[in-house]
Amino acid sequence: MNNSTTEREVSAMYYTQEQIDHANQADLVSFLQSQGEQLTRAGQEYRWKRHDSLTVRGNKWYRHSQSKGGAPIDFVMEFFGKSFTEAVEMLTGEKGAAPPPDRPSPAPLSDFRLPPRSTDNRIARNYLTAARRIDEDVTGFFFSTGDIYEEAAHHNAVFVGRDESGIPRYAHQRGTAGNFRLDVKGSDKAFNFCYHGEGERLFVFEAPVDLLSFLCLFKKEWQKQSYLALGGVGEKALLRFLSDRPNIKTVYLCLDSDQAGSDACSRLAELVPEGLTVHRLVPLYKDWNEVLQHRAEIADGKYIREAIYGLKEPPQEETVEIIRMSEVDTQTVEWLWEPYIPFGKVTIVQGNPGEGKTTFALRLAAACTTGGTLPGMKPLPPFQVIYQTAEDGLGDTVKPRLIEAEADLDRVLVIDEAKRELTLSDERIEKAITQNGARLIILDPIQAYMGEKTDMNRANEVRPMFRRLADVAERTGCAVILIGHLNKAAGGQSAYRGLGSIDFRAAARSVLLIGRVKREPNVRVIVHDKSSLAPEGKPVAFCLDPETGFSWIGEYDITADELLSGAGGNTATKTEQAERLILDLLADGKELASEEIVKAAAEAGISERTVQNAKRNMGGILGARRVGGQWYNFIKKKQPPEPAS
């Protein structure tokens, strides 16, 4: 660029990325020779006579004395004192153009140039290490990168700030004698003296000397983090640094320990983008270099007067409490009546009115108070039972039926509701269980204990109430039985016949369905309709005979849906079905293995026991013979009648 080019013209220059790339491909040997510089060949490289520690090869240069090098544009800026745009023009011979109107220009580069460098950094090095007592390994690091060097004319220490591309955009001169300080003309304070590490922390200082001093005081693995000098207390460099480096999560403001530093910390903390954490580290003396000067006098390395945490913190996201299954204690289910009624869980017993729910509940309560058993139930020591009913009178109905069931009446307890009605969420339930050591509580019917303001058809109202009751059962180990009515929908699946929200059924760990067998009016069957803790138990029947009273029948072959619809039935009907199936399978003189008959019956919903009953009934016409290890069945041939004598 000739000398007639004005600063206004220079500041308007713009080069495309293609032109910049072209400049960085320039052959430095040819360039130096065109400038009249003398080069000496050394193998495949050339040594520059004016800087004998510098070698060039193609478009690369390397200064061995400072262990630094780079591309042609950096070379021209460093050794010819040119600005960025001047260096591009000098290498390409092309003048820049005005920036396109739609392209923002972050800052003009053209009027900024680094001061010429001294042939060595001896005076600047001595100033920093002797006068400012900064460790040689710290200063040496930045001298080697070129971020600190000695200016040629007055031997000032120059602190360089670069943009993301490594191009110098800022320089600050600090006199090595006296108090001279000056930002180089054209410096962009958004790019101040700094060090960029890979960590998530940024330490911020007023001046480069404070930054270097801090590194000496806290040297361990310092290169992992980032450090920035503001060149005062302005926010421009800080905001630009954070914008360019999204990895930063925590900012430590390490400004001077005076009122100006305190005020600046408060202001900067407000300006830091949301989502970052801001702390302040207050030096023991006015600034960090003064702390360094007194390092030998400070005991135990306590260089910080005060650490002020939380000047700014990101909004605290609510932590989700997590339970690892590896930390959960495995628990064995304890059973009142396996697999129908577990301890510590909620069980629902439901059915239509008058079909035996209360009878079953009272028989169960009586057995628990005396150590008695139900079919398949393991004996347990007698225990206290709480029985709450809203449908039957205690004196005229409940007590007589308990006496009939031979209950120990001293062990049957009732929570007094004279002053206040009981609900499922009532705290008296847990208190009554724990105070009396009850292991079973029965509430009959469930609808009466929902509370007058609870809509039992709304899941959002039912679910929390059931959750609290389930928690009570879990904490106390008490079996909770809720007696419920079925709705009036005919023919529906058993899962949807419970009165109220489906959440009743979902919250229970076991659901028992009690119903009357249509073809045997005295027979009631308990069907295990849901089981979350074990395989479902087989249906169990009991008889309510008007003359002989209550008696257990035992296992019964019927499904829940058959019981509700009246389509299925009784033992006799199933046996008849099995007999017809056997006749069909063995028609036309066929023989069939016994296990094949059992398999075919199972597919038709008929149990093996019912098949055996059918075979006994068919003894007169059903034959059997053993072939190898298997039994085969067949229909016996009719014998002709004997002739009359």
Image (tube, grey):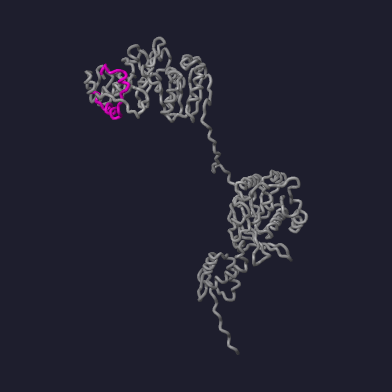
The N terminus, quarter of image:
top left
Residue 416 can be seen in this image: no
In the rendered image, the vertical position of residue 515 relative to residue 287, given as above or below = below
- Judging depth in this view, the residue of 369 and 628 nearest the camera is 369
Residue 447 vs residue 643: left or right?
right
Res 615 quadrant in image:
bottom right
> Which one is nearer the viewer's eye here, 644 or 444?
444
**Horizontal and vertical percent for residue 501?**
61, 51
Near-viewer residue (98 or 177): 98
Residue 465 placed where, x, y %? Answer: 64, 46
How many circles with numbers are drawn on the protein?
0
Residue extending furthest toward the front? 101
Q: Position of residue 604 (x, y in %)?
A: 54, 66
Q: Is residue 62 magenta?
A: no
In which quadrant is the C terminus drawn?
bottom right
Res 556 visible: yes
Q: Is residue 638 above or below residue 565?
A: below
Does 24 lie within the magenta span? yes
Q: Is residue 147 left or right of residue 217?
A: left
Q: Quadrant of residue 25?
A: top left
Position of residue 195 relative to residue 346, above or below, is above
Q: Position of residue 148 (x, y in %)?
A: 37, 18
Out of 262 and 607, give the one closest to the viewer: 262
The magenta stretch is 2-29
The outermost residue toward the bottom is 645
| Direction right: furthest residue | 395
